[in-house]
Amino acid sequence: FPVTIDEGWGGNGVWYSTDFGATFAKIPGTANCTEVACSNADNYVWLATASGLKKWKVGDASLTSVQGPAGGCFALQVSKDGQVIVAAYGANKTYVSINGGQDFTDKSGAITNNLVPTGAARIEYAISPTLNSAGKYSLYATRTNSNLLSMHVSHDNGQTWNQFVGASGPPNEFDIYRDQGTYNSILSVDPTDNERLLIGGIDVWEWKQTVN
C-alpha cells in the first residue's frame, strides 16, 4: 500500500510496502506528488504530481505519464474498477475519464451548466466504492479557499454535476474548515451507502442525500 508524505509544495515522496507495513521503500520521482489513488482492477497506483498524472507499479524503474490535460495534476480519485478517474489540473479544473485514463473530458465551468467551477485554492474528490441504483458511480467534489466555496455531486460517472452546498464559513454554524480549508480537506464515501458523504475539515461532517 502507498503512503504520501507531502503538503502540496514538495515533500518526502510516496512510500510503499509489500509486507503489510513492516518495511517501506520510496517510489522514484515522487517528491512533488500531492495525492495517490488505487483501483481493484490492477496493481498500478495513480499519482497526482506537479508534472501531471502518473502511474506506477512495483518493479517499474520510473513513473509512467498518463496523457491528459496540460499542466500539473493536484487532486485525484479512481473508481474501484479503474475506469472512472476524476482529477484536477491547472487552476483546479475538473476533468473526468470514463475509460481508464485513455482520454479526459473537461467538466469545469458554470454551475448552471451542470459543471464544477474553477478557481478554488484546493479541490478534493471522492468516488463511491459501489455502483448506484443507475449502475453508475457517484462522484463528489468540495472546493475550498480558507473556507468552503461549494460542494458538488454527480451520479452519472462525472458527466453532469449539481451543487448541493454553497459557500460557508465563520461565523456560520456550518463551519467545517475554520480558515484551514487549504490544509485540512478530505472526502470519503460510506462503503455501505454511496449517497452518504463524510467531509473532513477541522471536524468530520456528513451529508446524506434524501428525496423529498
Image: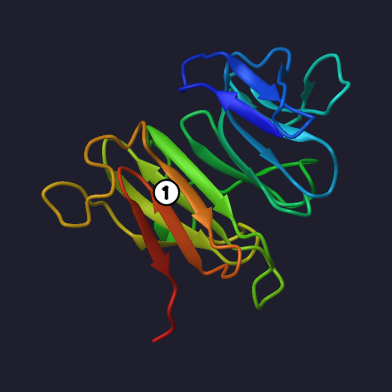
Closest to the observer, 211 or 20: 20
Coordinates of residue 122 in the picture (x, y in percent): 41, 35
Q: Is residue 201 visible?
A: yes
Along the line of sight, which residue is nearer the eye, 211 or 188?
188
**Is 124 situated above or below 20?**
below
Looking at the picture, which amino acid does disc 1 mark?
Thr
Task: Count neighbours of disc 1 (C-alpha within 10 A) and say few if under 14, some if 14 to 19, many if 20 or more.
Answer: many
Q: Position of residue 18 (x, y in %)?
A: 80, 30
Up the image or down, 88 lies above or below 71; here it is below
Query: In this rendering, is residue 156 above or below 33?
Result: below
Task: Give residue 95's quadrant in the image.
Answer: top right
Find disc 1 in the rendering and name its residue.
142
Residue shown at the point (35%, 57%) measured from the top left: 205
**Which quadrant of the view contains residue 210?**
bottom left
Horizontal and vertical percent for residue 1? 71, 34
User: Going 76% across and 41% down the picture, which residue do you hit?
Assistant: 101
Horizontal side of 25 relative to 204 (left or right) equals right
